[in-house]
Amino acid sequence: MIIDVHSHTPQYRGTVPADQRIINPAWRPDRAVSSVYNWDEYLREQKPADISIVFGVAWHPGDRTGGVNGIDESSDLPGNLNDKTAAFVQAYPERLIGFMSLHPHDPQALEELERCRCDLGLRGIKLGANYQIFHPLEARALAIYEGAQRQGLPVLFHQGTSPVRMAPIRFAHPLLMDEVALRYPDLKIIMAHMGHPWTADTAVVIRKHPNVYADISGLFYRAFGYYEAMIKATEWNVLDKLLFASDYPVTTAAETYDALHKVNDIVAGTSLPRVPEDKLEAIIYRDSLKLLELN
C-alpha cells in the first residue's frame, strides 16, 4: 500500500470556472502548476497512492477555502476550509484521511480543533508558521500542540523555504521543531519537504526525537538537492523516518514515485555514494498510518 501524507484539498467539487483557474510558475523550476482544481482532478493525479492525507491551510483566522494560492479563493463548497476537507473525505473515505488547519491567532482555534475532531472526523492538524505568520514557540501555538498531543492528533508543519513573499522563512526553520519536540515529546510531528534547503538540520532533528518524521514532498524537481537530501538521510541513518508524500498539486504521487527510483541517476558513472535502493523502495511502501497512529 502507498500512503501519501501531504496533499492539499481541492477548492471545487465540480467544474472549475475558467476565470478561476490559476497557473503558478513559482513553485518548481521545471514547469508551472495548475493550482485551482476539483475533486476528480485530485483523485486522478493521486494515483498510484492508495490513501492520501489531505488538508487546507488557514492562511488567516476565519479562512474560508484554505487553497494553496494564499488568498480567499472561490469554491463551490459551503463552510470554512475544514468543512471543505471533511466533505471531500466523507465522499471518499476509503481513499482519504483529513487533517484540519488552525490559525493560532484565531480566538476560536481550540474550539475549532474540537469541532473538527469530534464533528468532522478530521484526524490531524496542518500548520505552516511562515504562511500563517506566527512564531512556532509563541503561547497561542503551544496551546494547539498541547491539545494535539492530548488528543493524539499528529501535526504536519510546513518546513523550509517558500517563494511566498509575505512568509517569514525563519518561522519554518527545522531547528525550531527540535524545541517543539522537547516540550511535547509524545506529539507526532511531520516535518514537510525535509525542511529544504536545510535537510541536514531536519535529519538531525528526526534522528533525535522518536515521534518526529519528515516527508519527501516537493523535493525531486531539484535533482542534486534531492540526491543530497537523501544522502544526508543515509549518512545520519534516518531513511526509515522519511514518509512518502507528494504535495499535490505542486507534484503528483506518480512523479514522486518515479523520482524515488531515479535518486542515484545524477551520480551515475562517478564514485559518489549511492542511496541504498532497498531503502528508497521502503519509503514508497512505508506504513505511515501505523507510525502516526492513524491506522
Image (cartoon, rainbow, N blue to C red):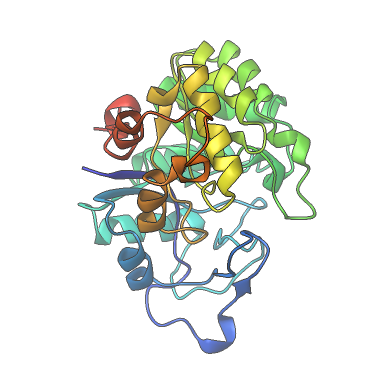
Q: Is residue 112 visible?
A: yes
Identify the image quadrant of residue 286. top left
For the point 46% across and 53% down, the residue is 82
Q: Residue at x 54, y 30 (%)?
A: 272
**In the rendered image of this protein, does residue 212 appear above or below residue 13?**
above
Is any part of residue 127 visible from this angle? no
What is the total number of numbered labels drawn onto the structure image? 0
Q: Is residue 270 left or right of residue 141?
A: left
Q: Is residue 38 left or right of residue 159?
A: left
Quarter of the image that includes the C terminus: top left
Q: Nearer the viewer, residue 144 or 248?
A: 248
Relative to 209, does residue 171 appear above or below in the rendering?
Answer: below
Front residue of 142/165: it is 165
Q: Quadrant of residue 254?
A: bottom left
- The percent position of residue 196, horizontal first and vertical second, equals 63, 38
Residue at far bottom of view: 18
| Most foreground residue, 65 or 201 | 201
Q: What residue lies at 64% left-to-right and 23% top-to-bottom? A: 201
In the drawing, does residue 140 fall left or right of residue 155? Answer: right
Residue 147 coordinates in the image, percent (x, y): 50, 25
How far across and down, in percent of the image, does residue 113 sit?
Answer: 48, 38
- The structure residue drawn at horizontal position 36% and vertical position 52%, both measured from the top left corner, is 258
- Say whether residue 28 is left or right of residue 251: right
Quarter of the rendering occupied by the N terminus: top left
Q: Position of residue 83 (x, y in %)?
A: 43, 57
